């Protein structure tokens, strides 16, 4: 059995790379197949991780679990690969109404926010550029992952374990106790192909709903932010020269995969009323998030083939969900530990559950 690897992973995006790293941490072996596409979701993403999300600004799903995990996983990765991909930057939410301010001062007093909310800033920050009438809130334990740096480092050091080609589903042979794919024998295959899961014959029943996103790279004339400024979108400073990523849009995927004038307009509508400074647009790009019908990932094992698994649907939160759920998937494969209902492949929608309960 020595020539059999433990895992064959399809896809070296963020999901596949995090998974492979977690497998290696467990002293297991892996091979990866990736077609080398530079247009994957991971390479265009903003890479933000943020404990307080959504319009209502609440703690993100599984916040305490996933934040403890990412704060261990990525720094250890950076140290091992001798890179700096995990960049911690505080967040600043400037309030746009008295109501928001009042709600937030009340909510942030709850101890569940203690380790994330730094405090209310009555007079606001960056007053030269941002209206401070209603003040704002500072959040820590936030930042971004420079995903291309992360992926390139992983690829450079694990090249001998990466087969660069389009995965050929017809080449899978189901053997007794293992799977053969061309010259590779593996105990398990894990599919992590992001949006290209649409071509995967093993998981056709899963209800993926990809979501398009657009981003701008801009350069402010004078404003120099040391926070990610977040209101109805984000302004992420990536250097001290005023260069920022501005994101992101959320659109259902239609035919148009490339950046559009509409997307650009939506992004400008986020920054222009917020920041009183001139800026130039340096780049405009787009990508497709691998999202699902209920915005929860699809993680688990094929109903019939017990050594075929999927790690996908990380949606808009690949950076924060990836490390936690790669552990859970491996625990489920190796130790039979049950995965949470919310990510299981056979979960029902809210509506389906209501219908089932009313029968
Ligand atoms: C505009 C935008 C902004 C975003 N911003 C953020 C953000 O701020 N924070 C955050 O956490 N997330 C963000 N995301 C989401 C994030 O990008 C995803 O959650 C994550 O990158 C998904 O990674 P993945 O590995 O599942 O998919 P992918 O990145 O698509 O990777 C899949 C890999 O599989 C390969 N592949 C697929 N099919 C095959 C095949 N048949 N054979 C061989 N190789 C194959 C592909 O080439 C690719 O390398 C954003 C996404 C977009 C589009």
Image: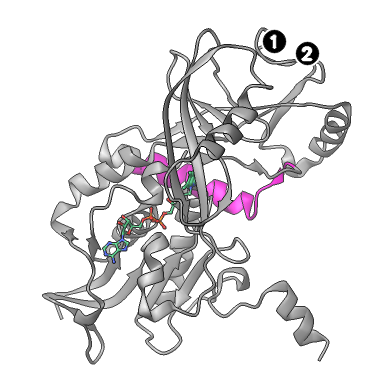
Q: Is residue 91 visible?
A: no
Residue 35: where, in percent of width, then height? 23, 58
Q: Nearer the viewer, mark 1 or mark 2?
A: 1
Whether residue 168 appears in magenta in the rendering, the answer is no
Task: Say the numbered circle drawn on residue 123.
Answer: 2
- Image quarter where the C terminus lies is bottom right
User: What's the residue at 74%, 23% (across, down)?
Assistant: 136
Whether residue 61 appears in magenta in the rendering, the answer is yes
Badge 1 crowding class, 10 Å Cα cut-off, few under 14, some 14 to 19, many 20 or more, is few
Label 1 CB, ligand 1: below 8 Å?
Answer: no
- Determine whether, in the image, residue 42 is placed left or right of residue 37: right
Principal secondary structure, stretch drawn in magenta: helix
Q: Total label count?
A: 2
User: What's the residue at 47%, 38% (across, down)?
Assistant: 46
Residue 214: where, in percent of width, then height? 50, 41
Q: Are marks 1 and 2 in contact (CB under 8 Å)?
A: yes
Disc 1 designates what residue? Answer: 127
């Amino acid at each position: 059995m020595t020539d059999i690897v433990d895992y064959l992973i399809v896809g070296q995006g963020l999901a596949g790379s995090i998974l492979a790293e977690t497998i290696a941490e467990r002293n297991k072996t892996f091979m990866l197949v990736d077609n080398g596409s530079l247009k994957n979701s991971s390479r265009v993403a903003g890479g933000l991780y943020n404990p307080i999300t959504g319009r209502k600004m609440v703690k993100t799903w599984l916040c305490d679990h996933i934040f403890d995990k990412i704060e261990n996983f990525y720094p250890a990765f950076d140290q091992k690969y001798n890179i700096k991909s995990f960049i911690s930057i505080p967040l600043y939410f400037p309030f746009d109404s008295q109501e928001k301010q009042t709600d937030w001062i009340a909510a942030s007093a709850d101890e569940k926010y203690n380790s994330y909310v730094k405090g209310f800033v009555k007079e606001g920050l960056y007053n030269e550029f941002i209206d401070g009438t209603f003040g704002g809130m500072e959040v820590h334990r936030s930042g971004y992952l420079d995903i291309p740096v992360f992926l390139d480092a992983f690829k450079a050091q694990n090249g001998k374990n990466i087969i660069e080609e389009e995965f050929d589903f017809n080449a899978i042979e189901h053997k007794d106790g293992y799977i053969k794919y061309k010259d590779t024998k593996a105990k398990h295959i894990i599919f992590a192909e992001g949006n290209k899961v649409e071509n995967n014959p093993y998981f056709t029943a899963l209800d993926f709903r990809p979501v398009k996103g657009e981003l701008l790279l801009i350069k402010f004339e004078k404003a120099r932010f040391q926070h990610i400024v977040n209101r109805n979108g984000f302004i992420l400073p990536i250097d001290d020269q005023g260069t920022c990523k501005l994101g992101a849009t959320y659109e259902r995927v239609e035919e148009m995969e490339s950046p559009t004038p509409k997307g650009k307009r939506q992004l400008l509508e986020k920054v222009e009323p917020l920041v009183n400074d001139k800026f130039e647009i340096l780049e405009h790009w787009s990508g497709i998030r691998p999202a699902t019908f209920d915005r929860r990932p699809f993680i688990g094992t094929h109903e019939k083939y017990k050594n075929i698994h999927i790690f996908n649907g990380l949606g808009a939160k690949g950076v924060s969900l990836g490390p936690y759920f790669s552990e859970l998937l491996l625990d489920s494969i190796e130790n039979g530990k049950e995965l949470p209902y919310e990510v299981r492949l056979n979960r029902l929608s809210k509506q389906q559950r209501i219908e089932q309960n009313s029968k």
